Amino acid sequence: MEHEKVVVIDFGGQYNQLVARRVRENNVYCEIYSYRTPLEQIRQMDPKGIILTGGPNSVYEPGAASAPRELFEMGIPVLGLCYGAQLMMHVLGGEVLRAPEREYGKTEMVLDRPESPVFDGVPETSTVWMSHNDYISRPAEGFEVISHTANCPYAAVQDQKDKLYAFQFHPEVLHTEYGKQMLRNFVIGVCGCKGDWKMEDFAKRTIEEIREKVGDGKALCALSGGVDSSVAAVLLSKAIGKNLTCVFVDHGLLRKDEGDLVSKVFGPEGPYDLNFVRVDASDRFFSDLKGVTEPEKKRKIIGEDFIRVFEQEAKKIGKVDYLVQGTIYPDVVESGLGGESATIKSHHNVGGLPDYVDFKEIIEPLRYLFKDEVRKVGLHLGIPEELVMRQPFPGPGLGIRIIGEVTPEKVKIVQDADAIYREEMDKAGMNKVASQYFAALTNMRSVGVMGDERTYDYAVALRAVSTVDFMTADAVEIPYEVLKTVTNRIVNEVNHVNRVFYDITSKPPGTIEFE
Ligand code: XMP
């Protein structure tokens, strides 16, 4: 992909992807590479700038993640962040020591050189986010201090002549008030990037590239109806039309009307030129799930059945040349430190690579995009917002939102309750607050009363969380009125439910899903 590019070198810090996100927010394309990547390879990429991320090591420890001196001598601007800043000093002859006190949290930073290009538009005092045990006790020769904090005499230093900058703080986290501005100053101001990386261009170029690569070959895509596989499928369809076959395995564990929505968009009545195969395999899934109550076992069965059904369909098609996967950049980066790893991480919605599908190569058109970029491409390609803006839905579907045995009756209950819940949440504008919300079916039955009758029915659990990364999450404070409406509607409209609970457990200790 030929485009002006910034390279983010990853030293194992927890914010590595965030750094890349911030760069891309300026419409500047960037990629993450491990610090182990040979310098020659980085040089050949001809980056406009290099950013070194934070990391867990101490630069002076033997075997610590390092960088060669030549990295700073290529004439390419370099910005070091936290560990990256310390490393730059260490490698270039400065001194890094253990700080008398670990510094963690928001700190006020004062500019010593407000005229520095990286501080364009940054006020003389502002808040920055610090998280470090070591500190720069003496900058390398040729560097001057451009800002400090109470505990950190060299919060930022620069060698303007060589375009080298080092920040002890983390501009990529939002707690650093002017962090975005500083990163923008670096990539646009210092590196001279134009900032013209646009999703429209990405889509257009990717379609052309696929067309060229696949030619008259045949491609096969497992379509789940999720954002990633949908966008991947549409890119392929625009590139190769009917030479693409999408197989949509309906395991019977989808949300209410979801299978029909996917079929409407991708089926023959939809706007796309492709072969669409919907397989109703629910009988098989229900039969294999009979009597199974253990969550991991359910996941395994669903994952395996999925692959087997997909394979069966693939066999009917015969030999295909390419298998399309909706892998996105975080999958790539997480599959190996810094994303240098070429390992193919199976797309988790598919649950693994089908062993017996006869194909030549895998195509992953979204391999370099973050989720919100995938969404932008999807909207640009005209995929309905309903699909593109969908919240995450696990591959094993409602199978892991039903505690205990999964049966068609229980699936129907949770589908209906979930549809009501989502409708009311959307109506109340809670979809703007919650990152993910859904109903689950507990395995609890209890006595209730309906009209004159005694009931012995299920309890539905509602979940709504706000989260940025889905690794940790907080329960959303849903207005009581909304909860009341939802509860009334569910117990009145859904058979076999006589109680509704709202789960306010955060993650950890809970998980987001309710299995
Ligand atoms: P947990 O429950 O682990 O979920 O807190 C974190 C996020 O991951 C989603 N999730 C899955 N997504 N296949 C998926 O594609 C799965 O098997 C799966 N399990 C959990 C979950 O919906 C949440 O967004």
Image (cartoon, rainbow, N blue to C red):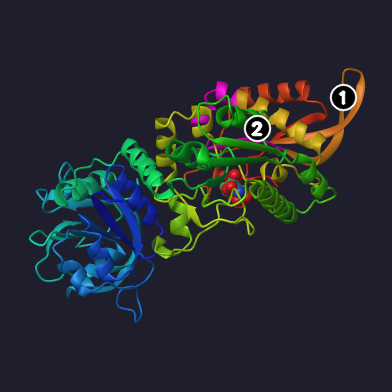
Q: First in sequence, mark 1 or 2: give its number.
A: 2
Residue at 58% from the left image edge and 28% from the top image edge: 268
Task: Specify whether 141 is left or right of 17.
Answer: left
Q: Tell me if residue 511 can be seen.
A: no
Q: Secondary structure at mark 1?
A: strand
Closer to the camera, 101 or 247? Answer: 247
Task: Specify whether 287 is left or right of 372.
Answer: right
Q: Secondary structure at mark 2?
A: helix
Task: Specify whether 455 is left or right of 513.
Answer: right
Badge 1 is on which residue? 449
Closer to the camera, 286 or 147? Answer: 286
| 1 or 2: mark nearer the eye | 2
Residue 202 position, x and y percent, is 34, 41
Query: What is the tally of numbered marks visible in this picture?
Result: 2
Q: Is residue 388 above or below residue 486?
A: below
Give the Cα separation between the discs numbered 1 and 2: 35 Å
> Is the CB atom of the residue marked by disc 1 within 8 angstroms of ligand 1's nearest atom?
no
Amino acid found under the numbered disc labelled 1: Val
Residue at 25% from the left image edge and 49% from the top image edge: 3
**Range of residues picked out in magenta:** 424-440
Amino acid found under the numbered disc labelled 2: Gly
Where residue 7 sits, quadrant-wise, is bottom left
Does the segment drawn in magenta span residue 201?
no
Badge 2 is on which residue? 259
Residue at 89% from the left image edge and 28% from the top image edge: 455
